[in-house]
Amino acid sequence: MIDFKLYAITDRRLCQPQLIQDHVASLLDAGVRAIQLREKDLSDTELRSVAVPIDHICKSYSAKLFINSHINIATDIGVDGVHFPEPLSDTIQKAKAEHLLVGCSVHDLDVARKRQMEGANFVTYSPIYPTTSKPNPAVGLEGLSQVAGSLDIPVFALGGITPSRVLDCLKSGAFGVAVMSSVMSYKTGIDQAKNYLKQIEEYL
């Protein structure tokens, strides 16, 4: 069940010198209830060593943890789900067979429909606004509205989402918003997370 509206995506380099598990704990303490562990440069062993304490923290807050791409680590540790940037044709079904929730990154309507058909539980659609971290051209609120209105699964708006843009995304049909750099910042990330949650709560 997708019962969260703010999807926080990790980048441990942004929260240094704080340990990523400590930063995640602070995000959860602020009210975040879904984390995607997205540390693509780590080896399987390194990723597992980070994922285990974060999973314990998430469980203590009744928050969901998604591991980026690694079904084996997700199932071994017992997290809630996985998130795939570009899954192979049978990858989603493999994850579903392990009783994992599945999120997928999409950048156009056709792919979004395909992921829904393959069994994804939700998608992140990006980039909504121009951002240096996303090479694709911004799709805008009109593109977001089209995708959200065409799917039966939750669509999370991603890319250039500031707290002041949350309301427009939700009004355009987004189920929630996905964010990374703003909430992972060592100095301002926790306050920003609170700002996102405040905007979502006011809309609801």
Image (tube, rainbow, N blue to C red):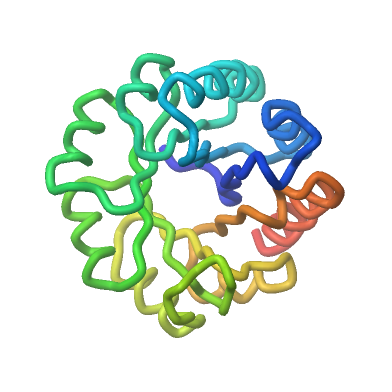
Residue 148 rendering spot, x and y as whole percentages: 39, 69
Total marks drawn? Answer: 0
Would you say 21 lies left or right of 119 here? Answer: right
> Where is residue 73 drawn, in percent x and y?
38, 22
Would residue 83 be found to the left or right of residue 22 on screen?
A: left
Q: Is residue 166 above or below residue 15?
A: below
User: Could you tell me which residue is drawn at 19 percent across and 60 percent down?
Assistant: 114
Residue 170 in view: no
Looking at the image, residue 187 sits to the left or right of residue 98; the answer is right
Q: Residue at x 76, y 49 (%)?
A: 185
Q: From the viewer's perspective, is residue 134 above or below residue 59?
A: below
Location of the N terminus by quadrant is top left
Front one among 70 and 3: 70
Looking at the picture, how far across and down is residue 163, in whole percent? 73, 65
To which quarter of the image does residue 92 belong? top left
Give the vertical position of 55 relative to 3 (above or below). above
Task: Write the residue at 60% across / 23% down.
Answer: 54
The location of residue 69, given as percent across then percent down, is 35, 38
Q: Quadrant of the C terminus?
A: bottom right
Residue at left offset 68%, top offset 32%: 20
Q: Quadrant of residue 178?
A: bottom right
Evaluate whether residue 80 shows in this view.
Answer: yes
Residue furthest toward the left?
90
